[in-house]
Image (cartoon, helix red, strand yellow):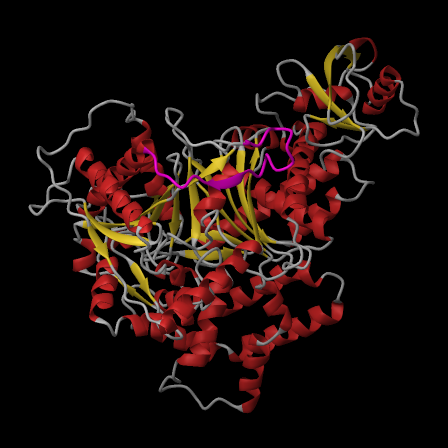
Amino acid sequence: MLSEQGKLPRLPIPTLSQTIERYLESISPLVGNDKDALTTTTRKAQEFLKVGERLQQRLKSYDATQENSWLEKWWLELAYLSWREGLCINSNYWLAVADDPRAYELAAASIQLLPSDEGFNMGRVWDSGEYGEFQVRRAVRFIQRTLDFKELVDTDRLPVDRTRAGPLCMSQYKCIFGMTRIPRMGCDELRQDEATTQSHTILVIVQDQIYAVEVYDSAGRRKPNGDLETELHAVIADVVMRAGQSELDAPVTVLTAGHRDRWAAAYAKLEQQPRNRTTLNKIQESLFAVSLDTTFSDPLGSINAHQENTKSHGTQIGHNRWYDKCANYVVDRNGAVGYIGEHSPCDALIPAIMIEYVSKAVAQEPIERGVLIPQTPDYKTRVRRLRFTVDDEVQGMIREAKAEVERTSRASCSRQIRFETYGSDWIKKTAGIGPDALAQVALQLTYYRVHGALAPVYETASTRQFLHGRTETVRSLTPQVAQCVYTMCDATTTPRDRYTALVRAATKHQEMLRTASAGQGVDRHIFGLRMAYNRLDPLPSESAMTDHEKRAIEEFFEDPILARSTTFQLSTSGLFPSRYLTHTGFGCVAPERAYGINYIIESNRIKFGVEGKTADVGNGTDVELFETTLRQTLIELKLVCEQAGTSEVASTSSTGTPADPAPTGTQAKKVVVRFRSTGNAPILKKSVYKISSAQRFQALIVFLRKELGYKASEPLFVYVNSAFSPAPDEIVFNLARCFGLDGQLTINYATTPAWG
């Protein structure tokens, strides 16, 4: 696994002139027509360029003193460990895993949500007040396969990750297990050492009660499934018994979800007591955590309810998790598995790779009711409850943390947007552009349509081609993307105009992504220069800094345009195509009109995990409207590519031959159209018709009104595929070619607005 670490280059330091040039290019879409602001910012940047070389030299000198890179320690401290807001939603990411279709003895709501119910798509979380056999058995499978992965890491048998550019740094895989964040006033710490990584125990958390469960015996042998199932059942039985006798300890777990300085104060007080010190040490010396919840999703299999429960617990917000652990599985009453990760030691990509490996392995192990599980003969459980002694002051802190986390959760709206019309296959073969580029254009265009403004964008670029590389910012709002947005929103432009703008935006985006991945981005370098000014001593060869130089440096760092360009209202990150990850999410980073978006582009669909604040807290943030608009935008982009006849701009279609034009006159064929009523709209006696493909969509609307007996003044809303309403002059042939399924074009109609 680490065999090629020695071949990896160090993270480079870009040239000062290159960074300033790219920075100025990146801000032009945000400044727009404000020439005075652009002139002022350009002057500040050029003045900084004249005097900033001394900071560049300090940074280079500092790099020579660091074991791995100039960025690593500063980034860990400033981007993560100094962050004082609570980890729940604000910092920890959350992942949801596909359900097992063979699950049995499932809990279900007494009154279940139906497809006709308003909240069906979002789902809801119920508390069953009980635990299930399948839940325990699936939890054990995930524990075992995670230990398999750990052993691959420990023995360096994990294959080296590679791209076409070469091997990638594998150091972050070493940061998953036995890693815990420790709260300290002002700046937290991380603990990982031999005692934590070679531990034989994991944490099991049930109703906020914490247990150390041995997964290896005293000889270091892995315990079989049956032994671990017995252990988990014993933990549950112990908690249920103590709950019945009102003997549960205070929910210290909630403190890990809330403000870091409050948790640091409580931690300092807790560790003064010997039993608490022992408990905290045992928590840190566990490999990872497993939370067993009594909650479940309604409707069964609801991804939105599942991810809501994973991120913060659906009914007792912030409870039953240890947010400081790098790895914390969450298993609900029906065996639905999620994962929350503390972000500071490694980026979400690394645990996601592990979870894909683990989930695939678990899916290949049928869990069958009534089948005996291998177990050590006469096995005796070794349940160890980790206790806290809590005084009134800490109890008060727990109440404060609980109230805070509940406010955070109420202000957060997250959902899964699953777009099934196309994926990477169509984007590459027919649209002729990079899938990630199309996703970024779609997100920016959606934001513009929802909020009437362009958004500064953070997109994650991996710098793992360098030693201990993590991430760089792709400033995805380029002048070309901005122009594409404006072109798409201009009713006077043609499909070819729009497609040409899309191709230019995508080409520029690919260039930006390559540049950032090569360590030549803007944001990490400016961060390093700022640190060189604030923290590094002048070099012996430096002349004294003049007042003019100091003023030029500070004016650049304090420029409102620089601050605005890093207030990322779209914080985005893409993951690899995944069969088993059904939702991936993280919180937005800007306070107003902002969204945190993780997406997975598969061959035939795109999955978006979106988080934003409620409209009152986020000053107009609207996740529901964002979803509707995003779906419509993605379909519109497809239509643009198809209408443009991509062969005219990108030379050929996916088959290597020019795209066929829409038929006219006697060439026109019939299109099968199926009409489906929505809501209280009347149902047609006959729902399937054949219509000339040369007709425009307006003719189809006129025909539908005639069949329904509706006058032109009566409201009628008409959609394609329950998704969007085409322009009246759209050709039916194009709609059928792009959006027809199984030889039919589905037309939905309603008397009130139903979709975007």
Q: Nearer the viewer, residue 202 or 657?
A: 202
The total number of labels drawn is 0
Range drawn in magenta: 111-132
Q: Residue 723 placed where, x, y %? A: 68, 31
Question: What's the residue at 75%, 68% (across, down)?
Answer: 35
Question: What's the residue at 37%, 72% (across, down)?
Answer: 392
Q: Is residue 221 visible?
A: yes
Question: Residue 732 lies in magenta, yes or no?
Answer: no
Residue 7 shown left or right of residue 751 in the figure: left
Question: What's the residue at 40%, 73% (across, down)?
Answer: 59
Q: Residue 233 placed where, x, y %? A: 25, 39
In this view, 601 is above or below 463: above
Q: Residue reaching furthest left? A: 219
Residue 234 shown left or right of residue 84 in the figure: left
Q: Nearer the viewer, residue 99 or 10?
A: 99
Q: Residue 741 placed where, x, y %? A: 63, 18
Q: Nearer the viewer, residue 335 or 445?
A: 335
Q: Which of 640 and 673 is in front in this view?
A: 673
Question: Residue 124 lies in magenta, yes or no?
Answer: yes
In this view, 327 is above or below 730: below
Residue 338 shown left or right of residue 388 in the figure: right
Q: Residue 312 placed where, x, y %? A: 46, 51
Q: Check the picture and name the quadrant holding the C terminus.
A: top right
What is the chief secondary structure element of the magenta stretch?
Answer: loop
Q: Can residue 264 be seen in this view?
A: no
Question: What's the residue at 50%, 33% (across, down)?
Answer: 109
In this view, 15 is above or below 444: below
Q: In which quarter of the image is residue 295?
A: top left
Q: Residue reaching furthest front? A: 245
